[in-house]
Image (spheres, helix red, strand yellow):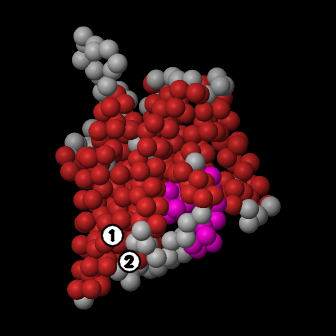
């Protein structure tokens, strides 16, 4: 199970893009394209789930249990921290209801009493509703022969997307799970199959895909073009395919800091808004420029996420991996190394 450093670096890039997006909002600016980090995450998630279940077949129950143990504890901590802050009056715009808090904790899309948007208490947790839905569909597909699993997931996601286009709805569940963004998981699975079968492009094409993808994201940002999953999904898929193509040709090398940010990307994603809010309030009181606030908040958001990874997420992961009975043989690396621990 080789380490895919490129996937780790993309996870870092996606998390940092989301951090800058939120930091710009708090500083009174705009970096809207940073939200496309979510599209990259979803493609990566589909890629990783397809690859690790090929290398290490699991039952649907074990798959779901593994994903729940990986995702839920840290998310619940961050959500409950948000609830505690709301009860203490630290977030004056946050309105709490028991139903919304429970829906947030159990990944049920609901409209927020604070904004009316389909957001959980911890706003960025909306993406985890999609992740958990994908895991549920993927787990059911594991009941099928391997050759039928990808087509089955593609049919389900495609049918839901088509239904959403034909029968749009304001219902929170329908509005969430009938969005075309769910196709990004399928795209990731397809890329995973290409990688497993050794059919990824060569270095020249791979480099071109990376350049084209980054140019597309940059053009959207520079010219303030409208974008959605139909735009960013293909760009994210090109970025992932180009990156794994370059890595297959030995052109991606291990780098400590990007890999650390990739390992910590989940914690960065969950905890950065707490740090950014504090920095933004300090910047406002001190009268510093919006650009300075943006830069400091972005750096602090990433750093805060890394601290949370070291103090919270990593100890929990190590506790999960600790064998009940000591083994006489050294433990092997996780599938895909850090990438196997991603969302």
Residue range of the region highlighted in magenta in the rendering: 107-127
Secondary-structure class at tag 1 = helix
For mark 2, what is the residue? 26
Q: Is residue 284 above or below residue 41?
A: below
x 77%, y 55%: residue: 163
Q: Residue furthest left?
A: 256
Give the numbered dot on residue 276. Answer: 1
Name the residue located 60 percent from the left edge and 54 percent from the top edge.
103
Of the pair 336 and 176, the residue shown nearer to us: 176
Q: Is residue 311 left or right of residue 67?
A: left
Q: Residue at x 65, y 32 (%)?
A: 140
Question: In this view of the protein, which residue sits in the foreground, 208 or 124?
Answer: 124
Residue 98 placed where, x, y %? 60, 59
**117 magenta-colored:** yes
Quarter of image, res 15: bottom left
Measured as percent of width and height from the top left, residue 260 is found at 25, 47
> Looking at the rendered structure, which numbered label has been put on residue 89?
none
Q: Against 13, is 57 above or below?
A: above
């Amino acid at each position: 199970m080789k380490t895919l450093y490129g996937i780790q670096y993309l996870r870092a890039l996606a998390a940092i893009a989301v951090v800058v997006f939120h930091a710009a909002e708090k500083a009174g600016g705009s970096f809207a394209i940073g939200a496309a980090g979510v599209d990259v995450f979803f493609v990566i998630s589909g890629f990783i789930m397809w690859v690790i279940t090929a290398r290490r077949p699991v039952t649907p129950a074990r798959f779901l249990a593994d994903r729940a143990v990986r995702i839920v504890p840290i998310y619940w901590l961050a959500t409950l921290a948000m609830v505690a802050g709301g009860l203490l009056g630290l977030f004056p715009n946050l309105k709490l209801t028991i139903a919304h808090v429970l829906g947030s904790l159990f990944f049920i899309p609901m409209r927020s009493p604070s904004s009316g948007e389909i957001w959980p208490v911890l706003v960025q947790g909306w993406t985890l509703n999609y992740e958990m839905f994908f895991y549920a569909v993927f787990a059911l597909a594991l009941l099928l022969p391997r050759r039928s699993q990808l087509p089955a997931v593609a049919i389900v996601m495609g049918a839901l997307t088509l239904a959403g286009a034909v029968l749009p709805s304001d219902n929170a569940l329908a509005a969430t799970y009938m969005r075309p963004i769910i196709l990004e998981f399928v795209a990731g699975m397809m890329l995973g199959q290409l990688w497993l079968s050794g059919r990824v492009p060569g270095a020249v094409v791979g480099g071109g895909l990376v350049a084209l993808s980054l140019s597309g994201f940059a053009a959207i940002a520079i010219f303030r073009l409208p974008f959605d999953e139909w735009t960013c999904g293909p760009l994210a898929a090109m970025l992932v395919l180009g990156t794994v193509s370059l890595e297959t040709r030995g052109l991606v090398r291990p780098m400590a800091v990007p890999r650390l940010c990739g390992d910590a990307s989940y914690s960065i994603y969950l905890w950065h808004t707490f740090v950014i809010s504090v920095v933004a309030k300090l910047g406002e009181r001190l009268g510093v420029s919006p650009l300075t606030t943006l830069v400091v908040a972005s750096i602090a958001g990433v750093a805060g996420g890394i601290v949370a990874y070291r103090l919270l997420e990593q100890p929990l992961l190590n506790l999960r991996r600790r064998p009940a009975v000591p083994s006489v043989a050294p433990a092997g690396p996780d599938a895909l190394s850090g990438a196997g621990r991603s969302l």
